Amino acid sequence: MSLYPMALRLTGRRVLVVGGGAVASRRVPGLLAAGARVEIVSPELTPFLRGHVDAGRVAWHERRFEAADVEGAWLVHVAVDDPVAADQVSAAAEGQRIFCVRADDREAATAWTPAVTRHGQVTVAVTDGGDRRRAMAVRDLVALALESQPPVALEYKGVALVGAGPGDPELITVKGRRLLAAADVVVADRLIPGLLLGDLRPEVELVDAAKIPYGPSAAQEEINRILVERALEGKFVVRLKGGDPYVFGRGGEEAIACAAAGVPVLVVPGVTSSIAAPALAGIPVTHRGVAHEFTVVSGHVAPDSGQSLVDWSALARMRGTIVVMMGLKNLPKIAARLIAEGRPADTPAAVVQEGSTPDQRSLRSTLGTVADDAAAAGLRPPATVVIGAVVSALG
């Protein structure tokens, strides 16, 4: 069969979807992403589709299809498995000269949905001529090629604050990896997955932020200067940070510095080790019937320091999970303070070192003994401390 491939501009245009089941759930997000004005005709909806209706993104007619429903539509998707009902829809669409996609019988349809992969502004659609599996295989090969060596996106300007995740290079987001591939300059933290740097283009300028020879405050000022300076030179700068840029990553300071200089900033959230490290050690930070909240605090300042901004008394009174970042050095004082403020010494506690990396290690203990146990085990930073009943929730 000979096909004529094309792309449809659906922004603001009415698209009718007949059916409210699993197939419709798969089709509607793509239509919404294309800006279509989606209307669904179906007696029932999946909870997923109902969520779109409740949010006002989709209009729903809670009934069976009527021929008049196709009037004014630019495209019709038939997402039902009843051939008789599907024939009625496609016949009505044919009568109005409206292209119709059918999930039940593609040979009876006037339009097919291709196998699609999207990478930023690039959309690749593979039509199959009848061999759907082969089209999907080709689509997957193209997607793999784009992920391993994406085309440089010239539209990127300014600075992107990109969270690289907790340490496993595969845990960076798809968007983060795409921006990294487009960077002219990369300013990298010490805790980012090193394998990501091996994928940079040879001409990319790499600035190792850990080697800036100043004290902590002065080093941050120098990082800010580099970000602004390179961006004002017309280069696309990626500030690659471990975890999430705004979770104890000083990303806010960098965003402020860029904004003050008139440099546009794009923030790409990352998987924070405050959640990832416990999860990979078998500890959910929340669990039904065990913990309804979790609090993430920085432990780089000891509880008895005047510089500490943590209300340790309030934290000790809470019943949920406490996650302490950068707190291994001060763990003896942190544990003692929480116990003194009312947390039982036998509260389950755990330490996870270098979560998601090949060097991940963990131990489980109690609040009263965790500091000594971590020292005896030789655990070292970066480490995540988890305190609460969730430590033993999964056994």
Image: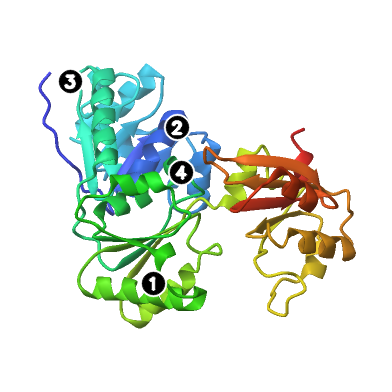
First reached walking from the N terminus: tag 3 or tag 2: 2
Q: Residues within 10 Å of mark 1 (few under 14, many from 20)?
A: many
Q: How far apart are the alpha carbons under marks 3 and 4?
A: 36 Å
Q: Is residue 172 above or below residue 245?
A: above
Q: Are marks 3 and 2 in contact (CB under 8 Å)?
A: no
Where's the C terminus, which quadrant?
A: top right
| 156 on left or right of 296 | left
Q: Amino acid at mark 4?
A: Leu
Q: How is the image coloured?
A: rainbow
User: In the rendered image, which residue does mark 2 sit on?
Assistant: 64
Q: Nearer the viewer, mark 2 or mark 1?
A: 1
Label 3: state its secondary structure.
Answer: loop
Query: x%, y% of residue 188?
Result: 39, 59
Q: Amino acid at mark 1?
A: Ile
User: In the rendered image, which residue does mark 1 sit on?
Assistant: 223
Q: How far apart are the alpha carbons under marks 3 and 2?
A: 32 Å
First reached walking from the N terminus: tag 3 or tag 4: 3
